[in-house]
Structure formats: structure tokens, C-alpha cells
Amino acid sequence: MHDLVGGEAFFAQLVDHFYTGVEGDPALLPLYPEQPDLAPARCRLTLFLVQYWGGPGTYSEERGHPRLRMRHAPFRVRTLERDRWLVHMRAAVDEVGSALSAELREQLHAYFTMAADAMRNTPD
């Protein structure tokens, strides 16, 4: 999919749009200890998505195995945070991916829904 969506540029735009939403979301912002500078988080997510969707393995080269659940374990992720994360990511996919086929957008939505749900680690 990496090449089908436009490569790293697409994922960088997607992540930028996503974090624009996160920056104004009081439910999510506390999950980012580097705030107000979200540039490191933007970079990590971009590299992860590029690698996950078939691009260069820079994320693993720089950070090792993704281990997403472990990396998110220090943060309280309930249904509220999962849902808010999905609001912003779905908006980013719809905005940045508007020129993509419906099938590609659906693949992105399905992945992000699964991933967000897998990050929940605290009962409501």
C-alpha cells in the first residue's frame, strides 16, 4: 500500500492532519509527555506507518521492534481515549486520503480501528 497511496509524503500529511486534531483535544493531549512539542510523536508515527504499510524499515532501524502495546503501556488508554484517537485519525484519512479509492480508505480505516482498540489498556 505504501506506493499506492503516495509513499512517505502521504503518511507525513496523514500524521500532520491527525496531530492537528490531537493538539486541541483535552482527552488525548495528556497522553503525550513531550507536549506542547508533538514533533517527536509525529516523526515516530510517520516512520511506523511508512514501515507498516510497506515502505522503508527506518522505524525499526531507529527504535527496534514496534511493540505497540508495550510502548503504550505507561499511558492510560480507555474507551474515551481510543474513541477520540479514532475521531482524529478517521478525519485525517478522509481528508488526506480523499483522492484514494474507497477500498484503500477502507483498508486504512480498518487498520486504525483495530490498532486503536488493541491499545486500550485500562478499564472504563
Image (cartoon, rainbow, N blue to C red):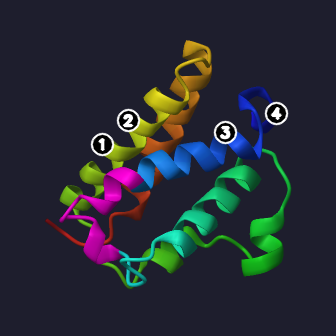
What residue is drawn where x is 53% and y is 70%? 39
Quadrant location of residue 48? bottom right
Question: Circles 3 and 4: CB distance less than 8 Å?
Answer: no
Q: Is residue 82 left or right of residue 115?
A: left
| Mark 4 nearby-residue class (10 Å; few <14, some 14–19, many ≥20) | few
Q: Which secondary structure lies at badge 2?
A: helix
| Residue at the disc numbered 3 | 10
Q: Relative to 38, is 114 above or below?
A: above
Q: CA distance from mark 2 to mark 4?
A: 21 Å
Residue range (magenta): 20-31
Q: Which secondary structure lies at badge 3?
A: helix
| Residue at the disc numbered 4 | 3
Q: Relative to 12, is 47 above or below?
A: below
| Mark 3 nearby-residue class (10 Å; few <14, some 14–19, many ≥20) | some
Q: CA distance from mark 3 to mark 4?
A: 9 Å
| Mark 2 nearby-residue class (10 Å; few <14, some 14–19, many ≥20) | some
Front label number (3 vs 4): 3
- Give amino acid for label 3: Phe
| Residue at the disc numbered 1 | 87
Question: Earlier along the polypeptide chain: callout 2 or callout 4?
Answer: 4
Asked whether 11 or 61 is in front, the reply is 11
| Residue at the disc numbered 2 | 91
- Give amino acid for label 1: Val
Q: CA distance from mark 1 to mark 4?
A: 25 Å
